Amino acid sequence: MRTIRTVVQENDSLTVEHPEVVVQGYRLTDREALAQLSDVLPDEQFVVVPRELLTRFAPKE
């Protein structure tokens, strides 16, 4: 997980300014799981993140 904070264009990478946490994972494609989601905006997508990763690396505030 990364917290994206600044806008920088270096070589082929782009960092975008947002206070949110950006996660990388496998796209959720299970139709039953997707059907259980609510309040989904048209441009939202979902990824699967292992729970262990969140508890180990999530910022403690």
Image (cartoon, rainbow, N blue to C red):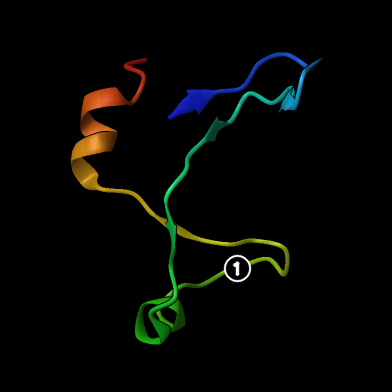
Q: Residue at position x 59%, y 30% from top?
A: 20
Q: Quadrant of the C terminus?
A: top left
- The residue indicated by pointer 1 is 40
Q: Residue at position x 36%, y 19% from top?
A: 59
In terms of secondary structure, where does tag 1 sit? loop
Q: Count up the numbered dots.
A: 1
Residue 7, above or below 25: above
Q: Is residue 52 visible?
A: yes
> Is residue 60 toward the left or the right of residue 8 in the image?
left
Q: Nearer the viewer, residue 57 or 39?
A: 57
Badge 1: few (under 14), some or many (20 or more) residues near its Cα, within 10 Å?
few
Find residue 14 and report its horizontal and vertical position in percent: 74, 26
Q: Nearer the viewer, residue 33 or 14?
A: 14
The residue positioned farthest toward the front in the image shown: 11
Residue 52, above or below 19: below
Amino acid type, residue under disc 1 in the picture: Val
> Is residue 35 toward the left or the right of residue 10 in the image?
left
Q: Nearer the viewer, residue 26 or 3?
A: 26
Q: Residue at position x 48%, y 40% from top?
A: 23
User: Quadrant location of residue 52?
Assistant: top left
User: Quadrant location of residue 9?
Assistant: top right
Find residue 8 and report its horizontal and vertical position in percent: 78, 14
Q: Is residue 15 visible?
A: no
Residue 40, above or below 52: below
User: Quadrant location of residue 13?
Assistant: top right
Q: Quadrant of the N terminus?
A: top left
Residue 61, above or below 18: above
> Is residue 9 toward the left or the right of residue 35 in the image?
right
Find residue 4 and report its horizontal and vertical position in percent: 61, 22
